[in-house]
Amino acid sequence: MTQPDSIAPHGGHLINRIATPEQHAEFLDKADFLPRVKLEARAVSDLELIAIGGFSPLTGFMHEADYNGVVNDMHLSNGLPWSIPITLPVSEEVAAPLKEGSLIRLDNPYGTFVGVLQLTQKYRYDKRHEALLVYRTNEEKHPGVSVVYKQGAVNLAGDVWLLERNPHTLFPTYQIDPLESRSLFRGKGWKSIVGFQTRNPIHRAHEYIIKCALEIVDGLFLHPLVGATKEDDIPADVRMNCYEIMLEHYFPKDRVILAINPAAMRYAGPREAIFHALVRKNYGCTHFIVGRDHAGVGDYYGTYDAQYIFDEFEPGELGITPMKFEHAFYCLRTQSMATTKTSPSTRDERIHLSGTKVRELLRKGELPPPEFSRPEVAAELARAMQAPEISYEI
């Protein structure tokens, strides 16, 4: 007997918008005659995640009613929680000739045909309003707000199809879509799975909270984001090397699955924490780790704002359990990793290095202390950061 999934996808049904062989052939026949829209990298990631079910229950780019509901009160028009608008913005010049009711060819930034949009609505929106509510700031220096301000003034809405599901160019063996991740969890007999979102290498504080979570659940879904990030974030290939090192030496192999998340980073702090949790729910996770300054950038969000936002939803409304952890550090008094909840130490008995200090050490070829980072990971980062013109965020 097949074991049932431990958790239903958001909305109750896992969406599949990958073109069937018949649709694929039909779209290719029409390709040269369809109006074209060239997608930015983030829109390509969004198209992909809609198609594979990562953004269930979305079947396409949001209509105005869903957009307004999400921006204003973090709910779709049908009442389901959703915290980040998933839209296809284009310029007025691009939008003007497009007819509602028509098929639109979607190309990636290189001009390759990647998908189709059934255009059912075009609408204008207030960029400043979106920035203030979603990102809690209208400052253009915020990377997420900057993207909003630079994008087109008209949103195209409607169902989409991904032309075909191709292996990831860099990490094909770690491309595990929601249908497959759920199958893997069932195969392992896992009934409780905790998802961990990351866009950075795992240091000792991360390792500590992950292992605390592993004491409670059956398995870990290590799900690093490999879509578009800030220029000073560590490249995905370097990060993946670091994750492989950690799994090889410091985690029980039978209790961890490493897979890539093709999403683009928004840096929306609290709102993105909710978004990340719902995406992992679609992949089959029952729990989701929310630590210090989740999905934050600069000083735009309070240290634990991404935890507080979960309390704005009714109990059980999100359908996934957040696991909230305080900032971890190495405690010199107890000679172990800890948080203020478990450590009797004073501030000067805690080892926590700033990202600036760690970058300075690595750039000089010096490794951070083992209390901060596992030596194999530090060595990999030092190797990748020797080029003085590169400034990675750690």
Image (cartoon, helix red, strand yellow):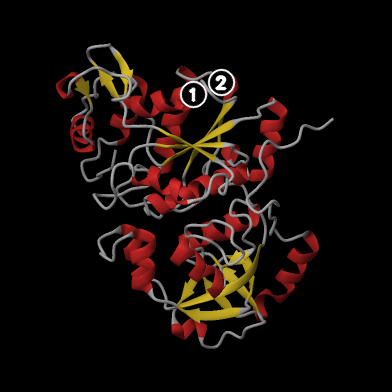
Instruction: Say which mark, if any, is on residue 247.
Output: 1
Q: Is residue 87 visible?
A: no
Dots 2, 1 in contact, CB < 8 A: yes
At a point 24% along the width and 49% down the height, the residue shown is: 299
Asked if residue 252 is positioned above or below residue 223 in the image, the reply reads: above
Q: Nearer the viewer, residue 263 or 78?
A: 78
Instruction: Say which mark, if any, is on residue 253.
Output: 2
Type of residue at label 1? Leu
Q: Nearer the viewer, residue 350 or 378?
A: 350
Left or right position of 191 against 268:
right
Nearer-N-terminus badge (2/1): 1
Q: Is residue 6 visible?
A: yes
Name the spot of residue 291 as percent of width and height, x first: 38, 36
Name the spot of residue 223 as percent of width and height, x first: 51, 38
Q: Secondary structure at mark 2?
A: helix
Name the spot of residue 110 as percent of width and height, x first: 50, 64
